[in-house]
Image (cartoon, helix red, strand yellow):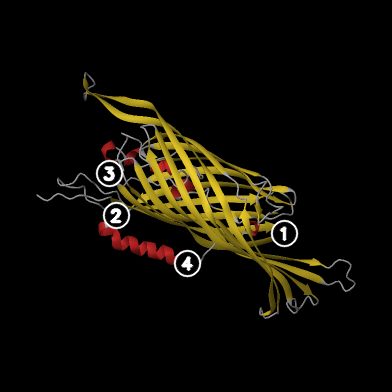
Amino acid sequence: MFNEFKGFALLVLLFFTTLVSMAQGLGNSPYSRVGIGDLMQYRGNIRNMGMGYTGSSLSSKEYMNVLNPAGLGNFRREYTDSLVKFDVGFTIQYKTFKTGNSQSTSTGANINNLAFTFPVTKTYTTGFMLSPLSIVQNKYSYQDSVANDPNHYSTKYKYLGNGGVYQFQWMNGVGITKNLALGLTVAYNFGSITQESTSQLIINQYVPDYENEVGSQKKSNYSGLSFKPGFIYKKQLLKRIKYTYYSADSSFIDSVVKVNRPIYFKIGGSVDLYSGMKSTVKQSLFVRNPNNLLITDSTFSTSSGKVNFPKTYRLGASFENPGYWLVAADIIYSDWSNFNKNGVKDNELNASSYTFALGGEIIPRNFVKNSSKIYRGHRVKTYRAGVSYTATPVNIGGRNLYDYSFSIGASLPIGLRSKGSANTAYVPILPKVGVAFVVGQRSTFAANQLSETYFRLQLSMTLYDKWFNKRRIQ
């Protein structure tokens, strides 16, 4: 599979995997200490990221819809998708932090998705994907004076966290009618998160690491199933456009051609349902000397229970002229007020979360002068842009945390392919390199609280091949 591009593709994938394995995580994020970390499941793949994380109502022959499984299915009598798709993506992130007059930076990289889909019938497509549900990576500290201490000593508090929860997803989409598609994703969620907090008495400001650190560590392991049903409904708004061609001197009509240029309205939605994710929490106390060696370490409690993970609702709508342009908007909502781990609530995660996203993509007309070349493996480039605004469920010091971003992106075909032959009507679609750049900020807009500005560069490669291409021998 992957024909003459197999060696090149595997080399690129190996490079991507090596890069990510050397820099797991997306850099320091103090807010990832809350709950189960920074949530990733709403972002989707490179196409969604370039359009402000929109895409719940989209379906395409060339792109996977990982936000809504119904987008994998083929509407009856629309087209036949016989392509196997393999997609790998990762994220590189640079952050700046500001608290009062203090500033710092952080960098990181992590895999975004590893996905594979293939058609089973003309209307039913299935596939698998590995992607992060949440990522935890935080490292920060602060120093404060000891209350009522006549010696005027101070204490340094340190916080360290890492880990995350991943999803292995089985995605299914099927076209029910020419206007309706349904889908279902079944995911196994697994992972572990370690959070550590320490305190250290500072007696001599000139030798701050002279005393031992006393701290606690909590390691949480998660496992469980989740389900995501979804739907997409489309309605054709415009059927045909008439083109009239006149003679060179405009004295008579040379020909009249009716070309199919439909504009579709689509609406789609999905809901994430978590079936009692299991949690095992192990807590321990330790003393660490200035050389970073453990002096004592003891486990004082181990508990098991369930994580009350909230439902996430997603609804989207779009207008699309296939092969030319589309505009999409999504709304995402989840209620975190009842979230708890093993019956313990997180006081900093106690509100509803909602996201508004708007985006679109365009294929410039100069690339599609001949409509027969669309979806036929030619060098068609796609450009994207989008914005998103999120009121997160995180509450710090009585103020909600907000996240807003702007993104641009593109998909660029690479390589050269033949135009087919008399023995096959199949013209291979070129592999695509995808890129998206997102700039955004997370802040509570309080004067003395942490403000986080991030710059994300997302890269992906998508490979295509025909499913069981039958060759003719003459």
Q: Position of residue 326 (x, y in %)?
A: 43, 37
Q: Residue at x 16, y 47 (%)?
A: 421
- Helix, strand or loop status at disc 2: loop
Location of mark 4 (residue): 21
Please rate how many residues cluster around mark 1, counting C-alpha atoms within 10 Å: few if below 14, some from 14 to 19, many from 20.
few
Check residue 101 in the rendering and tell me which mark sits there, or answer none.
1
The amino acid marked with disc number 3 is Arg
Check residue 255 in the rendering and tell me which mark sits there, or answer none.
none
The amino acid marked with disc number 2 is Gly
Q: Please say if 111 is above or below 235.
A: below
Which of disc 3 and disc 1 is earlier in sequence? 1
Q: Position of residue 221 (x, y in %)?
A: 58, 62
- Helix, strand or loop status at disc 1: loop
The amino acid marked with disc number 1 is Asn
Location of mark 3 (residue): 376
The reply to whether the C-beta atoms of the residues labelled 1 and 2 are less than 8 Å apart is: no
Give how far apart the Cα atoms at labels 1 and 2 are: 50 Å
Q: Please say if 295 is above or below 248.
A: below
Q: Position of residue 65 (x, y in %)?
A: 43, 45
Quarter of the view holding residue 313: top right
- Helix, strand or loop status at disc 4: helix
Which of disc 4 and disc 1 is earlier in sequence? 4
Q: Please say if 178 is above or below 64.
A: above
Location of mark 2 (residue): 415
